[in-house]
């Protein structure tokens, strides 16, 4: 049955290693942990059983862009699927959940933050779920490198669906993270775990230490042809490296979350098609990107953790062809990493001051704000409040780890409109300005309560009802805003900040050890692991395998250490 679904919907005759085992495990009702490397086909392991089983699969993922891409790909195959994220208004969410209740979808994708919504949880209990899939499951672990407090809410679904199996998926997990995932998701006994070997037969790991990273980078790019990702620590770094490579007549561009969405899409497409060979990017790039022929992944800056490095390096050679993962370091790289991490954990007094700045910025009084959602641009916040960018980001992360706030990636924010002119004056005004009045009449007829509250509107819908175009509607609403008839906030894409609790007294704000001291200890443990990887005279693949709990790994014979050892012999 499963192979038939695979063939009919994806065109493959056979599953990759471990995929069928994982599918059969969840299909038989067992809680299942799947650890497959980047490019190992994790999505197939929940999409195939979702089509085979009765009911609808609930897929929880922190990556909005990835969820949206998967939904589009599923729909192209004729598979019924939908996504709910924080950028949607209440009516849209309600409509999707109502359709789901009547079996409209086989898969529903949601962000973990959605589990904090009372509307969602109340409607969820009426849905027939086949299983719950938790993607990027390492995010639930205090020992993982990307802990997200909202993931802790997932276990509460167990009380609502005690008999529904849970599948957890991640690209990498240390033994501590494995234990934590099973514990936090309340895995039942017996449960199953499937872990692919971290070894990649076609991937050559290399570390290059030099005082001149630019020269090393240029040398490597000239030695290895093909599609390339160069990872940098910062947005400025990505731009700087890309421009340096362009000056050397190499086909390069840069990509990071600070670019407009249309610019990011254009640059990603150019790289995907091969028009751009080298993309210099922060780690905002690469997750869920389906490009199998990446020949080279270079880390220009030393990453925060070995887990992060392994996942990002693994984006090379997904087609099985010879590829390289290169880490560039300098004698002072680790010292710089330590200093950088000190900014990640500013003093608790500074964290409390940032909490107060947020309250002032959004004008939130003590005892209020729980569940409030605000557009949030870090650069703008730091500029207005005259704050250090890096330390502020560190403080916001600590507040997020402590559970007080949630920061999302870029979301779609629907257009909002409110009529601010008094109805009696509006009548007179319309008599004096009859041009395009059909648009205003359509709005007044379609959106009730628009005189008292700002309403989410759809310009396309208004255009259809008013027999005009979206461009005409948009221009008219902008004009109405300027002359004081309405307040109009057009559609935009922006990151969001969500308050998970009512605003508290900043001076007495409790920052628990799990969000501060414990994380500092683990940070230094991760620093030791990445330092050892970059300096020890031990096979790189063996070091990675041991870090992830696979003690029986043998020297790969391909990495720079193994090649150097062969030459000595």
Image (cartoon, rainbow, N blue to C red):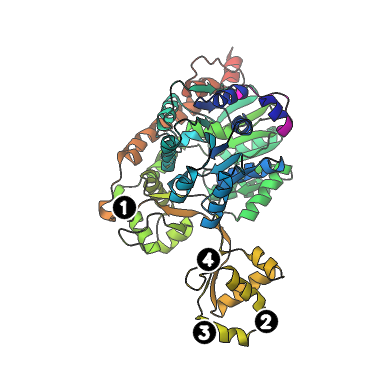
Q: Are marks 1 and 4 in contact (CB under 8 Å)?
A: no
Residue 152, given in percent of the width and then of the height, sits at 41, 38
Query: Between residues 5 and 261, which one lies in front from this camera angle?
Result: 5
Q: Which is more N-terminal, label 4 or label 1?
A: 1
Q: Are marks 3 and 1 in contact (CB under 8 Å)?
A: no
Label 4: state its secondary structure: strand
Query: Between residues 157 and 116, which one lies in front from this camera angle?
Result: 157
Find residue 228 and report its image quarter. top right
- Near mark 2 (Cα within 10 A), the count class, few <14, some 14-19 or many ≥20, is few
- Near mark 4 (Cα within 10 A), the count class, few <14, some 14-19 or many ≥20, is some
- Rounded to the nearest angstrom, the CA distance separating label 3 from label 1 is 48 Å
Residue 399, given in percent of the width and then of the height, sits at 37, 48
Q: Could you say which disc has been placed on residue 424 in the image?
A: 3
Tag 2 residue? 435
Q: Could you say which disc has been placed on residue 352 in the image?
A: 1
At 46% from the left and 51% from the top, the residue drawn is 119
Image quarter where the N terminus lies is: top right
Q: Which is more N-terminal, label 1 or label 3?
A: 1
Q: Are marks 2 and 1 in contact (CB under 8 Å)?
A: no
Tag 4 residue? 455
- Range drawn in magenta: 8-19
Q: Which is more N-terminal, label 3 or label 2?
A: 3
Q: Which is more N-terminal, label 2 or label 4?
A: 2
At 65% from the left and 24% from the top, the residue drawn is 16
Q: Which is more N-terminal, label 1 or label 2?
A: 1
């Amino acid at each position: 049955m499963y192979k038939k679904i695979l063939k009919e919907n994806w065109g493959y005759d056979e599953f990759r290693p471990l995929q069928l085992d994982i599918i059969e495990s969840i299909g038989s009702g067992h809680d299942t942990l799947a650890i497959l490397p980047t490019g190992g086909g994790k999505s197939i392991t929940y999409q195939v059983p979702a089509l085979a089983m009765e009911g609808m699969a609930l897929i929880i993922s922190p990556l909005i862009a990835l969820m949206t891409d998967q939904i589009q790909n599923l729909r192209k195959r004729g598979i019924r699927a939908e996504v709910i994220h924080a950028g949607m208004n209440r009516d849209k969410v309600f409509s999707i959940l109502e359709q789901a209740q009547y079996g409209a979808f086989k898969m529903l994708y949601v962000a973990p933050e959605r589990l904090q919504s009372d509307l969602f949880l109340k409607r969820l209990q009426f849905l027939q779920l086949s299983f719950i899939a938790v993607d990027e499951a390492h995010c639930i672990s205090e020992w993982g490198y990307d802990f997200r407090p909202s993931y802790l809410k997932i276990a509460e679904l167990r009380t609502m669906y005690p008999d529904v199996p849970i599948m957890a998926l991640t690209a990498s997990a240390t033994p501590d993270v494995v234990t934590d995932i099973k514990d936090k998701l309340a895995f039942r006994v017996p449960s199953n775990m499937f872990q692919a070997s971290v070894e990649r037969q076609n991937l050559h790991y290399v570390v290059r230490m030099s005082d001149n990273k630019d020269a090393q980078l240029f040398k490597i790019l000239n030695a290895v042809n093909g599609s390339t990702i160069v990872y940098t620590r910062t947005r400025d770094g990505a731009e700087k490296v890309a421009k340096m490579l362009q000056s050397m007549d190499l086909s390069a561009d840069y990509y990071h979350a600070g670019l407009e969405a249309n610019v990011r899409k254009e640059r990603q497409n150019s790289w995907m098609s091969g028009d751009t060979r080298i993309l210099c990017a922060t780690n905002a790039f690469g997750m869920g990107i389906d490009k199998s022929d990446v020949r080279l992944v270079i880390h220009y800056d030393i990453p925060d953790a070995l887990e992060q490095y392994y996942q990002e390096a693994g984006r090379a050679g997904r087609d099985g062809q010879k590829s390289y993962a290169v880490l560039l370091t300098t004698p002072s790289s680790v010292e710089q990493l330590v200093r950088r991490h000190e900014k990640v954990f500013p003093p608790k007094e500074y964290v409390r001051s940032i909490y107060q700045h947020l309250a002032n910025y959004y004008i939130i009084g003590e005892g209020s704000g729980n569940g409030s959602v605000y557009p949030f641009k870090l650069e703008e916040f730091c500029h207005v409040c005259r704050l250090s960018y890096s330390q502020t980001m560190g403080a916001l992360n600590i507040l997020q780890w402590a559970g007080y706030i949630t920061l999302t990636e870029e979301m779609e924010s629907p257009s909002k409109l409110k009529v601010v002119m008094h109805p009696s004056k509006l009548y007179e005004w319309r008599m004096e300005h009859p041009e395009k009045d059909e648009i205003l009449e359509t709005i007044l007829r379609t959106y009730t309560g628009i005189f008292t509250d700002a309403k989410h509107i759809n310009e396309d819908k208004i255009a259809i009802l008013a027999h005009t175009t979206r461009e005409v509607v948009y221009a008219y609403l902008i004009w109405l805003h300027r002359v004081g008839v309405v307040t109009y906030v057009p559609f935009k894409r922006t990151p969001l900040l969500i308050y998970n609790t009512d605003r508290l007294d900043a001076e007495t704000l409790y920052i628990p050890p799990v969000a501060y001291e414990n994380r500092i200890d683990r940070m230094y443990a991760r620093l030791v692991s990445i330092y050892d990887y970059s300096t020890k005279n031990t096979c790189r693949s063996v070091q990675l395998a041991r870090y992830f709990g696979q003690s029986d790994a043998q020297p790969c014979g391909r990495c720079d250490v193994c090649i150097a050892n062969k030459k000595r012999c």
